[in-house]
Image: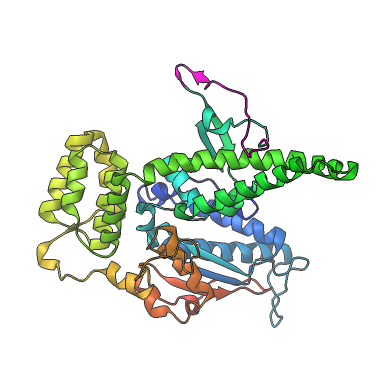
């Protein structure tokens, strides 16, 4: 199967260049690969009754997927005879998956340019997660295997940092649900990490200290405790590793520069212009990718950038970071992530402002990151548009929020698959 399982609830096709291929190079090979993967899934596990799609490429995938299911059915059973009801494939009925939602990346170009504030999101943003693994300095991960002593402190052997060619040696750490602690904290806002890690550390230390203080433990009690030791060692090692990683992230998130960037992003999402602040970061030669994300965010949320600023930003960016970025800037313009806005067309209102209000993407008040009741906690204020669309698919349902969906570029489709395969008709096209 083309889908590679990385976690208990995550499969991926690992088509990392598909966005560029489809939207820049006009190469839709990835569409065919996606269709084959979904068709094989349904052939093995049963058809998915409810299918929703948003965007032009999502529509292509849906049409081809339905066409392939029809072709497979005809190849197995042949065309129905005149007057007969279409024959139904036997054996594989509806799957345990109730709904398939197909979303173009192009329907939400804003979210990838916003800095995440969840533990997993920040690890990916600042370090990089590849195939559910992260590579970190060995000194961060080599925490020793010893449990805490009577005072609750670990007693690892002194170790020197390993190096390769003078640089700290990198070690891979799997990040998936097999690690119970990571499973618990991966989606937590970083502001909530300290309390969770502290509670987990206290629990392990109390368990170990309680046994050490029991001088009159029976043989059966000693035996029962030592049966827990391997799991306790693994839990303590995982805890130490995640404490070290959290401390690494905290050094960035506590910096004034990071906080100022968050303020700029929040202002851009609310429709404000921050061109002077972006220019200041550009002239300070901050990392090119970070500056470029802010420029794209300004363009996407502001309905484009006014001509005089657009031309000067483009020129200054190339002069600062090099003309090798010219191809990238041109590609971003073709995709619509960078756009020039003529002054005579500037009415003040933008499509993004309408989308923001329709989907309630910006939290009005302070976000409770400790006990969140809305997905906006993942950025401390902004709910990702694509995630909100998935939420609306469940409640109140896409049929109820058609006006909001029409604001988002691309067609909206909803179908219900049955035992008898069928192709897409115009009744499924909602907008």
306 vs 329, nearest the viewer? 306
Q: Is residue 131 visible?
A: no
Question: How far from the left and from the top, in percent, is residue 344?
Answer: 9, 66
Residue 4, position as x, y percentages in the image: 62, 47
> Would residue 252 appear left or right of 192 to someone viewing this image?
left
391 in relation to 110, above or below: below
Image quadrant containing the C terminus? bottom left
Rendered view: 34 above or below 349: above
Q: Position of residue 66 (x, y in %)?
A: 58, 66
Q: Is residue 377 magenta?
A: no
Q: Which residues are magenta?
A: 149-167
Can residue 158 be seen in this snapshot? yes
Identify the residue at image location x=49%, y=67%: 390
Is residue 304 shown above or below 156? below
Colour setup of the view = rainbow
Look at 38% across and 57% down and name the residue there. Answer: 111
Count of numbered circles in the view: 0
Is residue 362 positioned above or below 28 on the image? below
Q: Of residues 40 and 346, which is closer to you in this image? A: 346
Residue at coordinates 42% horizontally, 53% vertically from top-left? 117
Task: Considering the whole magenta stretch, tell me its main secondary structure.
Answer: loop
Name the spot of residue 79 as percent of width and height, x first.
Answer: 68, 70
Question: Quick one: 307 or 25, which is closer to the camera?
Answer: 307
Q: Which residue is rendered at x = 21% and y = 62% of the image?
A: 272
Q: Is residue 342 left or right of residue 59?
A: left
**Outermost residue toward the top?**
165
């Amino acid at each position: 199967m083309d889908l590679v399982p990385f976690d208990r609830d995550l499969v991926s096709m690992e088509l990392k260049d598909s966005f560029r291929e489809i939207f820049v190079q006009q190469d839709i090979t990835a569409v065919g690969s996606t269709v084959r993967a979904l068709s094989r899934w349904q052939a093995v596990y049963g058809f998915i009754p409810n299918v929703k799609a948003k965007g032009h490429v999502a529509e292509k995938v849906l049409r081809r997927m339905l066409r392939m299911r029809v072709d497979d059915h005809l190849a197995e059973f042949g065309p129905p005879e005149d007057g007969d009801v279409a024959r139904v494939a036997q054996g594989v009925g509806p799957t345990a998956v109730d709904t398939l939602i197909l979303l173009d990346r192009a329907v939400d170009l804003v979210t990838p340019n916003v800095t995440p504030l969840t533990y997993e999101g920040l690890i990916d943003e600042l370090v990089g997660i590849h195939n559910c693994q992260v590579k970190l300095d060995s000194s961060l991960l080599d925490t020793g295997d010893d449990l805490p002593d009577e005072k609750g402190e670990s007693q690892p052997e002194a170790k020197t940092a390993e190096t390769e060619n003078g640089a700290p040696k990198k070690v891979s750490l799997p990040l998936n649900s097999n690690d119970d602690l990571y499973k618990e904290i991966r989606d937590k806002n970083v502001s909530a990490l300290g309390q969770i890690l502290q509670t987990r550390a206290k629990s392990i230390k109390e368990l170990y200290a309680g046994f050490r203080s029991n001088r009159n433990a029976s043989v059966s009690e000693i035996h029962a405790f030592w049966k827990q030791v391997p799991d306790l060692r693994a839990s303590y090692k995982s805890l130490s590793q995640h404490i070290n990683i959290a401390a690494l992230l905290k050094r960035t998130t506590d910096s004034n520069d990071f906080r100022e960037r968050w303020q700029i992003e929040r202002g851009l999402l609310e429709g404000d212009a921050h061109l002077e602040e972006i220019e200041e970061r550009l002239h300070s030669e901050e990392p090119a990718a970070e500056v470029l994300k802010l420029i794209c965010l300004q363009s996407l949320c502001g309905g484009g950038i006014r001509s005089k600023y657009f031309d000067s930003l483009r020129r200054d960016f190339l002069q600062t970071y090099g003309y090798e970025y010219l191809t990238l800037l041109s590609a971003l313009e073709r995709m619509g992530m960078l756009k020039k806005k003529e002054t005579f067309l500037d009415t003040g209102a933008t499509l993004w402002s309408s989308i923001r209000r329709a989907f309630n993407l910006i939290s009005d008040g302070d976000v409770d990151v400790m006990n969140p009741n809305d997905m906006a906690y993942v950025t401390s204020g902004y709910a990702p548009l694509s995630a909100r669309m998935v939420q609306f698919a469940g409640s109140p349902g896409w049929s109820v929020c058609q006006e909001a969906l029409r604001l988002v570029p691309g067609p909206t489709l909803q179908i219900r698959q049955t035992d008898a395969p069928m192709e897409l008709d115009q009744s499924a096209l909602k907008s």
